[in-house]
Amino acid sequence: MASTSTLPTPSRPVTNPPAGSLPPLPTPKPRRSLPRRCHRYDPRPSLRSPLSSSNSTSNLTTVRSASSGRTPSSPDKSLRRTISIASFPQPPKAGGNTSRPSTASSVTGVPASGSTGTGSGTGSTKPKRGSRLSTGTTSSYRSSKTPSLLNGSADGKSILADARDPEASPGHSRSSSAQGSCSTSATTFEDVDDASTAKGGEGGSKPKEAKGNVIVSVRVRPDAPNGETARTHGEWSVEGRQSLVSYRGKEGGDYYYDNVFTTYENNAKVYDSAAKRLVRRVMEGYHGTVFAYGMTGTGKTFSMQGTATSPGVIPLAITDIFSFIRETPHREFLLRVSYLEIYNEKIHDLLSAPAGGNGPGTPQQEEIKLREDSKRGVYATPLKEEIVQSPTQLLRVIARGDHSRRTSSTQFNSRSSRSHAVVQIVVESRERVPSNNAQDKRAGIAPGGVRVSTLSLIDLAGSERAADDKERRTEGAHINKSLLTLGNIISGLSDSKEKQANSGDGRHLPYRDSKLTRLLQPALSGNSLVSILCTVQLVSGVNANTGETLNTLKFAARAKNNIVSHAKKAEEAYGAGGGDSGSRVLLERYRMEISTLRGQLDTQAKAQAEKELKWDEQQFEKEAHARHEEQVLEMQLARTALKERIEHLNRLILSSKSTGVNSHGSMSALGRLSRMSSIDNGTRSLRSSASQSTLGAGYGHSSMRPNSFMSVTSNDPMPGFPGGSFGQEEDDDMGEFGDGKASLQRQVTALQADLGDKNRYISTLERRLLQARRSSHSRMSVGVKSTTSTIAEHPDSSALLREKDMEINELRIQLDDKDRMLAALRSATRHRDLAAITSDVQSPDLALAAKGEIPTAPNSPPTTSHGNGATPATPIDKGATPMPPPPLPAHLKNGDGEGERDRKKNMDEVSKMLDEMIQGRVESGHLERDSLGAVKNVSGDFNRRVSTSAEVRGLKPSPPTPVPTAPLPASPPK
Ligand SMILES: Nc1ncnc2c1ncn2[C@@H]1O[C@H](COP(=O)(O)OP(=O)(O)OP(=O)(O)O)[C@@H](O)[C@H]1O
C-alpha cells in the first residue's frame, strides 16, 4: 500500500461523485509566496476567513506552542510562536519510565528514525524536506507522546506496540522537522485517570496529559472513486506512514497529524485509526466527539457515512457500540439516539421531520433551542430521542435522518450537504445486579449508579466559495460563518489557555456566535474526547483549490494544538431524581418504572385471580343451585309418585281386606283384578289402572257389593266383558264349591303381582336415592368447601331425603304387611283345601253347599234345590241391603262341624292378621278410625269406609258404602 504519493496536478481535476469529473476549479487567487524556510503561522488572521486563500497564504508560520509547560523556549509568544504542533509531552519509555513532557527539540522524545539531528532533531526520513521546510527561525520538536485515551495507551501499549497492531493506525515515529514543520502529536499511553491517579488525584497536572485526548487526522480524497489518483499533484505530497502532508508551493510546508490517510485508504482504516478507540471510551463513560471538516466535495459525508460496500465512521461506530455491549456482560446499557441538522442557523430535528424531508412547504417544526445544563452541558431541546436496541435499528434511525437532511448540488458536489448534521448517541450504562442477589434484582436495586455518556458524530457542511445561486449563497454564508466561528474559537483556545494559565481568567470565546460552536462547546472546551477528520483533495493546476486545502490543513493543525481535553468518565448518577439531568437517566427511570409496573402487574394479577375465583364460585353456586333445583324437582316427582303409589297400595290393601274376606271367602273383585292383571300380560300401567278401576270406579260395583250376592250372581256376565266368559271365570273363581278357594288362589296371584310391582318400584326408588346421594357427595367433594353449600348440606334437601327414607320405610312396612297377609292367605288356602278335602269325603253336600246350591247359613232358607226350580235370584239394585253370609247346610251345621271349625279358624286367623295390619296402619296414621269403629284413609279423598275387623271376624256384611255404586245387571236366573 502506498503511503506516500506524489500527486501531480491532474490535467482535469475530478470531483466525485462517481457521476463524473468536477467542473474546473476556479482559478486560485494569487498567493503571496510562502517563505519555505519558515512555516510561521499566525492562526488568528488566517482563520478570520477560512475560506479565503489569500489570508492563509501568508500565515502558515507555526501553529503555536503548547501551553507554557510544553512550550519550547519561544522567543515571542505573544506575537509569533514558532513551535511545532508536535510539542507535546513525551510518552513514557517502554521501560516504564514516566513520560516527560517534550517541550523543545532539546527535550528528546523518541528520536525520529533517521533523524539527521541537525540542531533540532529533524527527521532523517525527510532530510530534504526537513531542511527545505525548517529554514528560518522555526523550531521543531519531537512528537510528544501524551497519555491518551484515544491511542490505546489505556491498554498499556506503547507506540511501538501500537505500530505492530495491524488494526491500529501506523506508529507515528515522527521526525519533527527541525525547520519548524507543523505536526501534531502522536499520542499514546496510560489512561488519563490512571495517570492522574498515579499522581495522587485527578486535579493534579492535567492539561499536559489531556493533550492526547484529541486526535486530528487528514484524509486525502482520490480523484477517482476507485481510489486512483494521479501520481503527482504538483506541489503536494502525502506520506501516510509519517502522517505527513507537504506542500511545496507558496506558503508550503510539512503538515503532520495524528493520521494522514492517503487516497488508497478505505473507510475501515479511517475508522480504526481515528474513531474506534474514542467510541470504546464513550462506551466506558467518556463523552466523545468526532467531526469531519473540509471543503465541499472532499469526502466528509463519504467518510462519516460511507457507502453500502464501504461503511463509514457512523455505521462502524454503531457496530462497535453493540460489540462492546456484547463483550461487557457485567453492565447493562441503554442507547438512545437523536439526529439534528443546523441549516441556515436553525436547528431541525431530523428524526421528527416529515417524510420527504424539511423541504419548503413542509409543516413548521417547533423551534429547537440550545440550552445549557451543568451536567448535560449544551443540548438541543425539544429533540426527539429514539431508544434503539440493535445496530440495524440504530442504522435505520440514522438513515431516516439522512433522508431528511438537506442536500443540493454545488459546484464541487452534486449532492452536497448544506447543513451540519449531528448524530448523538447517548449511552447509559450501569453495573448489572449480581445474579445471586435475586431479591435486589426484583426490587430494582442496583449496586451502582448510571453512567451517561454521549457520542457525537458530526458531518459538517462543506466550506465553499460564494455560489451564483441565491439560495446556495445564503446557505454558503451560514455555513461559512459557522465554520469561521469554529476556526476562531479553536484559534482562540490557545490564547484562552495561556491567559487562563497566567491570570486564571480565560479569554471569552464566541461559542454563541453560531449554533454549531455552541453545540460543540463542551467538546471544544475540554469535556470530551475529540477526533477531527479533515478531508482534502489535492489538486494542482488552474483548478486547484489550494487556498481552501491549506486552510483545512491549518485548521487541523490548530485544532490539534489548541484543543485540550480533560475528558473524564462521567459520574454515576443515582436515582431518576428530579430535574432535567435526573430525568435524563432513562436507565434508572426505566428500572424504577419497571419495578412500579411490576408491582402494578402483581396487584392486577392478584385482583384478576380473585375475580376469577369469585366468578368460579358464582358459577359453581349457579350450577349447584341449578342442580339443586333439578334434584328438588326430581324428588318432588318421586314423592308424588310415591304418594300415588302409597295411596294405590293403601287402596289395594283395603280392597283386599274388604273383598278378600267375605262370608264365603270369595274375592270376586280382586279375582277379577288379578284376572285382568294376568290377562293384560303384565304391563304395570294397565294393572295399575285396573286396580284403580277396581278400587276407584269399580269400588262400588264389585268390591262393595255384598259378597253373598257376588257369590250368588257369580255366573252373571260382567259388564264390559261380553260373551259371559268373564262370568264363567268368575264361577271358576268362586271355586268348585263356591268356597272361595279358587278366589284365594287368584288373590294370592294378584298379591304376588303387586308385590313384584312394589319390589321393582322400591328398587327403582332405592336406585334413585343412591344416585342422588352419590351425585350430592361428588358435588360436595368437587365444590368449594367453604363457600358453597352442597345439596346434602342443604336443610331442604336433607329434609327431603329424610322424608324419602321414611316413605321407603313405610313402603317396606307395607310390603311386610302384604307379605304377612300373603302368608296368611296362603295358609288359609291350605287350611281350606284341607277342610274341603275332608268335607268332600264326609259329605258330598258340602260341595253343593259350597257351590251355593244348598243354603250355607243355618238361618237361611234354602235357596236352591236339586232339580226343582231355583229360587229366584234376589234382584240386585243399588243400595240393596247386603246379603248376610250364606247359611251353612244343615248337615254341616249339625253334622261334622270339623271342616266348619277349621274354616272358621282360618278365617279367624286371617281376620286377626288383617286386624293387626289395620291397627298398625291406624297407629302409623295412615288410617283413622271413626266412632263406629270403621276406618278410613287419612287422606280422606275417597272417604271410604272399610270393614272393621269385627265385621270381618263375624263375617257380617259390610255396611253399604257411601260411595254410590253403579247398578249391576241382574243375574240371570239359574
Ligand atoms: N475517499 C474517497 N474515496 C472514494 N470516493 C470519495 C472519497 N471521498 C469522497 N468521495 C466521493 O466524492 C464525492 C463527494 O463526497 P462527499 O459528498 O462525501 O463530500 P463532502 O465533503 O461531504 O461534500 P459536502 O460538504 O458538499 O457535503 C462523493 O461522490 C464521494 O463518493
Image (cartoon, grey):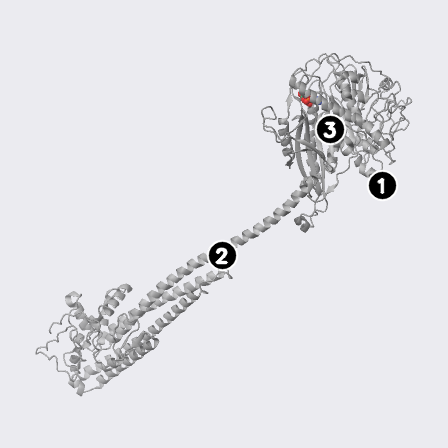
Callout 1 secondary element = loop
Q: For residue 512, which numbered disc appears in the image?
A: 3
- Residue nearer the viewer, 577 or 669: 577
Mark nearer the N terminus (2 vs 3): 3
Mark 2 CB within 8 Å of ligand 1 = no
- Residue nearer the viewer, 54 or 879: 54
Examine the rendering and report whether any part of residue 413 can be seen: no
- Structural distance between the alpha carbons of marks 2 and 3: 72 Å
For mark 2, what is the residue? 617
Q: Nearer the viewer, mark 2 or mark 3?
A: 3
- Residue nearer the viewer, 754 or 881: 881
Residue type marked 3: Arg
**Quadrant of picture, ligand 1:** top right
- Structural distance between the alpha carbons of marks 2 and 1: 72 Å
Quadrant, the C terminus: bottom left
Q: For residue 678, which numbered disc appears in the image?
A: none
Mark nearer the N terminus (2 vs 1): 1
Placement of 884 over or under 275, stated as above or below: below
For mark 1, what is the residue? 200
Residue 895 pos. (x, y %): 18, 87
Number of other residues with Cα within 10 Å of mark 1, as a class: few under 14, some 14 to 19, many 20 or more: few
* Residue 963, image quadrant: bottom left
